Amino acid sequence: MDSLIRALACMAAALSFGKLLRQPRSTLVFTALIGLLGYAAYQLIGGMLGFFVSGLLVGILCEVTARVVERTTTLFLISSIIPTVPGLGLYRTMMALSENDLERAGQIGLETLAGIGAIALALTFASVLFAGIRPPQRKPTS
C-alpha cells in the first residue's frame, strides 16, 4: 500500500510541476509516467547509482517521447525529474545548519550534492546520446 501511495505522489508531483510550468495538457500524462518510472528506478537501485540510473532513464525517456510527440525534450524533462531530486537532503542540510551542527550539515550536504551531480551527469549522457539523432524532416507539401 505504501508503494502505491508513493507512486501516486510521484505522478502527482510531476503532473503538478507540469501544470505549474504551463505544460500543454496533451503532454502531462507522459510527464507523470516518466516521473514515476524514474522514481521507481531510484527506489529499486538506491544510493548514488540509483540517482544516476534514474536520471539516465528519465533523460532517455524524455528524448524518445519528445521525438515521438514532436515537442522539445525540456518540456518533459523539467517536470519528470522532480520526483527524483533529493529535496529532503537539501532540507536536512539547512536544518543542520540552522542548528549549528556543521559536521552533520557538511555530511548530508555532500551526499545531496553528489546525488544532484549524478542526476546532472546522467541527463547530460542521455542528451549526448541523442544529439546526433534527428527526427526525420517532413517534406513540404505544395
Image: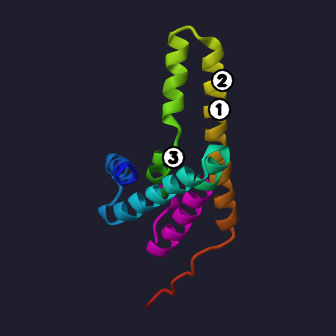
Q: Residues within 10 Å of mark 3 (few under 14, many from 20)?
A: many
Please tell me whether the stretch drawn in magenta is mainly helix, strand or loop.
helix
Q: Residues within 10 Å of mark 1 (few under 14, many from 20)?
A: some
Q: Is residue 26 magenta?
A: no
Region of the chain picked out in magenta, as a range? 55-75
Q: Position of residue 67 (x, y in %)?
A: 52, 72
Q: Which mark is residue 111?
A: 1
Q: Residue at x 60, y 19 (%)?
A: 105
Tag 2: residue type?
A: Gln
Q: Which mark is residue 133?
A: none
> Are the residues tagged 1 and 3 within 8 Å (C-beta)?
no
Tag 3: residue type?
A: Thr
Between 1 and 7, the one lying in front of the other is: 1
> Are the residues tagged 1 and 2 within 8 Å (C-beta)?
yes
Q: Which mark is residue 107?
A: 2
Measured Cα–Cα span from mark 1 to mark 2: 6 Å
Q: Position of residue 26 (x, y in %)?
A: 32, 66
N-terminal of the pair, mark 1 or mark 3, is: 3
Eyeballing the image, is 29 above or below 109? Answer: below
Residue 57 seen in render:
yes
- Disc 3 designates what residue? 84
